[in-house]
Amino acid sequence: MRRLIAVFALVSSAVLLVGCAPAPTPTATPDVTEPEYCARMVTNSGGLDDRSFNQSTWEGLQEAATKYNIDTDAIVSTAETDLAPNVSQAVATGCQFVLTVGFELADATLAEATKNPDVHFAIVDEFVDAPNVKPIVFDTAQASFLAGYLAAGVTKTGKVGTFGGGNQPPVTLFMDGFVDGVAMYNDKHETTVEVLGWNKDTQDGSFTGDFEDVNKGKSLTQTLIDQGADIILPVAGQVGQGAAAAAIENPGVSIIWVDSDGYVTLPAQFQSVVLTSVLKNTSAAVVETIGADLEGSFDNEAFVGTLKNGGVEIADFHDQSALVSAELVDELEQIRAAIIAGIITVTGPSSPQ
């Protein structure tokens, strides 16, 4: 009996001790927050500093980073084999928005967009049909029409030229508009200015075959100069710098740059040969697209840059302003207004719909 009483007392003491132990401190529940917004860009094989649409797209992404305080970065492609892996890498970062540049990235963009329906994509200069991909394209033929009219009004030889990096719609659209602008000048002024390097009817002409080899651009430009052209429109990314180099070596020859203002983006040594540039306001389109995504209003309807919405334009004449008469400036303004009003319709096989 004494043993039972002792055991009972021991058990009772243990229970009492347990009952008097302090309650455990509750574990704090961590705050659950949404991940910060980030965007990644993938260049085409022309690289980031192509003085063309990769560069202007990156400038737009940097502007969006400052305006919206978001995290941005670029993944640079240097060869065709980089393209698909780089888009996959961009998606793997976990960012909500992936921006790709150029027709070369269309297939990779579509593939990753299909596999990742919760990621929003945009692609510059190409149409990709998917619910989570927004095309950012430009009706550059409208601005090139003005450039062609200008070239026809400035040429001293009666011949102007153009060439492309490859026979693809974003390239040939510039060339179509250029040819049509020259044709309108000829009709209005009863002149016979000839365009070398592109036939709009057959959709065939002169191409370097890539967008990187500057020497090819210089060689092809020299061929056009030897045939009499004194104004050249290269539509070939950084290859166009070869056209500027050839123009420097041939007094009286000028170039018309594309995508960005060549007077600003090209090395200073080439400023004197830049007549104007056919501009694509890629930066503003990128900022607008990301802003819409942040607001929750992203859609897959194509953004089409035009003269009317400021998406395309021609640049100032800079050092060559003296070559452009006041009368020609007035005519260009009238044509711009007519295109915006729909009185003049600039179309071609590659025109964005």
Image: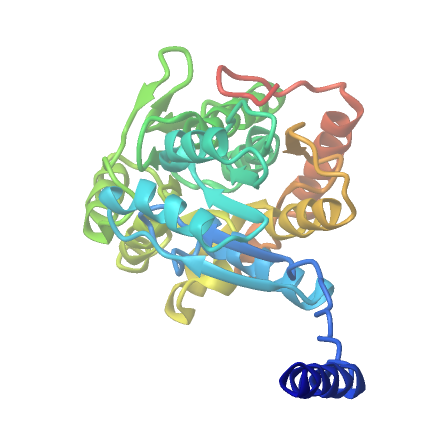
Residue 37 drawn above or below residue 159: below
Q: Residue at x 41, y 48 (%)?
A: 255
Name the colour scheme. Answer: rainbow
Identified at 45% across, 64% down, the residue is 271
Residue 36, quarter of the rendered image: bottom right
User: Horizontal placement of 147 versus 344: left or right?
Assistant: left
At horizontal 42% and vertical 62% (from top left) the residue drawn is 266
Instruction: State the residue lying farthest toward the front.
Output: 1
353 relative to 142, above or below? above
Image quadrant holding the N terminus, namely bottom right
Along the viewing direction, whichever of 201 and 89 lies nearer the viewer: 89
The quadrant in which the C terminus is found is top right
Image position, residue 160 (x, y; %): 39, 35
Whole-percent x and y of residue 349? 49, 15
Quick check: 342 left or right of 273? Answer: right
Residue 281 sits above or below residue 161 on the image: below
233 or 81: which is nearer to us?
Answer: 81
260 or 243: nearer the viewer: 260
x then y, percent, for residue 158: 41, 33
Examine the rendering and report whether any part of residue 42 can be seen. no
Q: How many marks?
A: 0
Q: Is residue 221 left or right of residue 48?
A: left
In this view, the residue farthest toward the top is 201
Q: Residue at image x 71%, y 75%?
A: 27
Using the rendered image of the protein, determine whether residue 336 is visible from the camera's viewpoint.
yes
Q: Position of residue 264 (x, y in %)?
A: 52, 64
